[in-house]
Amino acid sequence: MTDCIFCKIINGDFGTEFVYEDDNAVVFKDINPKADVHLLVVPKEHVADLNECSEELIGKLMSVVKKVTVQEGIKSFKTLINTGKDAGQEVFHLHIHILSGNIKF
Ligand code: 5GP
Ligand code: ZN
């Protein structure tokens, strides 16, 4: 999607460093971290939110959560998915927050 910030990041438009990447998803650091570690797991396919996400894809994304936390040695963490504006979603390209250490929300 051309006007989607996360699609642009996935496309490499901003040179964002990926902590993890596979066929289905990328993981990068949140630009405004709410914890010592704040990562975003983002599907390569543009999916607006969890309501639009298939069971297959959410399963793959949760698998990425497990892989990247193992890779980064993160043992204690919170996962968060905001779905919809009223719930605080600001970027309408599905993402799973991973937060660890001094979590501010
Ligand atoms: P939401 O509120 O939609 O669940 O979370 C969106 C998150 O994306 C926020 O935590 C925000 O800091 C992060 N974010 C927004 N724009 C960018 C960006 O351009 N780069 C990165 N790395 N994170 C972003
Ligand atoms: Zn997108």
Image (spheres, rainbow, N blue to C red):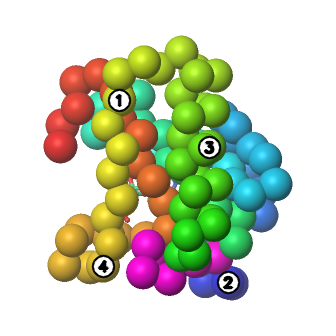
Q: Which residues are magenta?
A: 46-52
Query: Mark 3: few, some, or many residues within 10 Å (few <14, many ≥20)?
Result: many
The local secondary structure at tag 1 comes to loop
Residue at the (58%, 22%) spot, across then down: 70
Reading the image, the residue beneath label 2 is 1
* Count of numbered labels shown in the rendering: 4
Q: Is mark 2 within 8 Å of ligand 2?
A: yes
Q: Nearer the viewer, mark 3 or mark 2?
A: 3
| Most foreground residue, 2 or 55 | 55
The disc, 4 or 3, on the residue closer to the chain's N-terminal end is 3
Dot 2 and dot 4 residues touching (CB under 8 Å): no
Pick whichever, 17 or 87, lies toward us. 87
Q: Quadrant of the N terminus?
A: bottom right
Residue at horizontal 23 percent and vertical 32 percent from the top: 103
Task: Say which quarter of the image contains residue 2.
Answer: bottom right
Residue 36 seen in the figure:
no
Q: Amino acid at mark 4?
A: Gly
Q: Which residue is mark 4?
A: 84
Q: Earlier in the sequence, mark 2 or mark 4?
A: 2
Element at badge 3? helix
> Along the horizontal axis of the image, is 43 left or right of 11?
left
First in sequence: mark 1 vs mark 3: 3
Is residue 30 positioned above or below 61 on the image? above
Q: Is residue 47 magenta?
A: yes
- Quarter of image, ligand 1: bottom left
Which residue is disc 1 drawn over? 77
- Check disc 2 and give the amino acid type: Met
